[in-house]
Image (tube, rainbow, N blue to C red):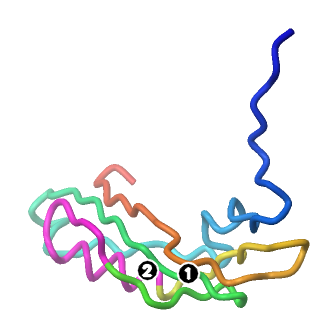
Amino acid sequence: MTEAASTAPPSDSPDTTAGTSPLNNARPVYPPDMEEENIEGRVTIACDVETTGMTSNCSVQSVQGGQSFAQAALDYVHKARYRPASKNGVPVKELHKVYVIRFRLDD
């Protein structure tokens, strides 16, 4: 008899799967200096996601490609609105949600 691994979080843990993409169609702005130089980038940012879906306490964890990408990524996560985590159907603050923002010239 085989047992399938459960991917559902335990009932006492918040559901944090909902806040992965913005609800308000916010898009990162490609830094013009990087676009001119044909440079692509990737930024990892950790933010708290408030019960309102707004981000707070954002900090850059890593940057590839240049610091212009870091600022563009921070601007983006501040504009974006996410579905908050929930616990028993009630919105809760999620700490240190990690977002990876990729800047690609073909996008």
Report crowding for label 2: few under 14, some 14 to 19, many 20 or more residues within 10 A (C-alpha): some
Determine which of the numbered discs, if any, sits on residue 80 in the image. 1
| Residue lying furthest left | 37
The correct choice, above or below, for 11 with respect to 86 in the image is above
Q: Position of residue 50 (x, y in %)?
A: 64, 88
Looking at the rendering, in which quadrant would you find the N terminus?
top right
Q: Are marks 2 and 1 in contact (CB under 8 Å)?
A: yes
Looking at the rendering, in which quadrant would you find the C terminus?
bottom left
Q: Position of residue 38 (x, y in %)?
A: 14, 57
Q: Residue at x 61, y 63 (%)?
A: 20
Please indicate whether residue 42 sits to the left or right of residue 39 in the image: right
Q: Position of residue 29 (x, y in %)?
A: 36, 75
Q: Secondary structure at mark 2?
A: helix
The residue under label 2 is 76
The verdict on residue 75 being magenta is: yes
What amino acid type is highlighted by mark number 1? Answer: Ala
Choose top left, top right, bottom left or bottom right for residue 61. bottom left
The correct choice, above or below, for 90 with respect to 88 in the image is below
What amino acid type is highlighted by mark number 2? Answer: Tyr
Q: Residue at x 13, y 68 (%)?
A: 66
- Assign the magenta stretch its main secondary structure: helix
Depth check: 64 or 35 in front? 64
Q: Residue at x 47, y 66 (%)?
A: 98
Please indicate whether residue 29 sits to the left or right of residue 25 in the image: left
Depth check: 56 or 65 in front? 56
Q: Secondary structure at mark 1?
A: loop
Identify the magenta region.
Answer: 60-77
Report crowding for label 1: few under 14, some 14 to 19, many 20 or more residues within 10 A (C-alpha): some
Determine which of the numbered discs, if any, sits on residue 40 in the image. none
* Label 2 to label 1: alpha-carbon separation: 6 Å
Choose top left, top right, bottom left or bottom right for residue 28. bottom left
